[in-house]
Amino acid sequence: MMDLKILYKQLLKRHGPQGWWPTRKCSYHPSNKTRKLSEEEQCEICIGAILTQNTNWKNVEKALQNLFAANTMSLQRIATIRREKLEQLIRSSGYFRQKAERLQIFARHILKNHGGFSTMFAQQTQKLREELLSLKGIGPETADSMLLYAARKPVFVVDAYTKRLCAKLGLCDENIDYHKLQKMFHEQLPRKQEIYNEMHALIVEEGKRKI
């Protein structure tokens, strides 16, 4: 059976650094996994994590562009904008009424309880994860994307590409539980945010091309 460390090296050699998570400031750049993020970039990543539910990234990019064009890329603006206006701005991402509601619940929660991302993300990882999961519309994959890419926490993100690739390689059953598969990555790879960042991005790239 293939070891995940070997798979990581193979994928990195095949595809090269992916530069995730892309933001308007740096797009896809190797520094994205280590450089200090601005509050706006953290907001952009978290909004993107919610918008990418049940759609493809191209549709999310259109919605993000609309939010920037409308000067709405901040917790304050998301929290206070008219719901109907927000729905129109993110319409390209699909399920726009549900997502507009989720974005406003998310933004209002952070502002009310933390005042911003820096205080919220300073929390211990498990406590922060539980808090995110308590919010309407935020499941494990969305919460872990926020933790890994915006909060810089060493938490591996499991998505459909991860399950399909691991099942194809005989590493797990195709119906494996999210947290069981996540545990496998946590145990076999060094517990480092930069490695989880790169590994998840590489799996997505592999999935888009081959799976």
Image: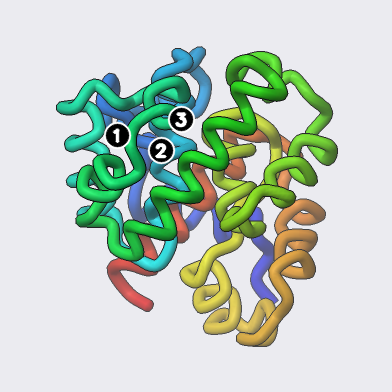
In the image, is residue 179 above or below residue 133?
below
The reply to whether the C-beta atoms of the residues labelled 1 and 2 are less than 8 Å apart is yes
Q: What amino acid is labelled 3 in the image?
A: Ala
C-beta proximity under 8 Å, tags 3 and 2: no
Q: Residue at x 48, y 37 (%)?
A: 46
Q: Could you tell me residue 5's position as x and y percent?
A: 65, 54
Disc 3 to disc 2, C-alpha distance: 26 Å
Image quarter of residue 206: bottom left
The answer to whether residue 147 is left or right of residue 199 is right
Kindly identify the amino acid type of the residue bearing the numbered disc 2: Trp
- Colour scheme used in the picture? rainbow
* In this view, 96 is above or below 125: below
User: What is the quadrant of residue 17 in the picture?
Assistant: top left
Observer-nearest of 148 and 78: 78
Q: List the residue tagged with mark 2.
A: 20
Left or right of 123, for residue 9: left
Q: Is residue 103 left or right of residue 177?
A: left
Image point (76%, 63%), residue name: 184
> Which residue occupies the foreground of this view, 129 or 86?
86
**Would you name the residue on which mark 1 appears?**
28
Q: Position of residue 148 (x, y in %)?
A: 60, 38
Tag 3 residue = 79
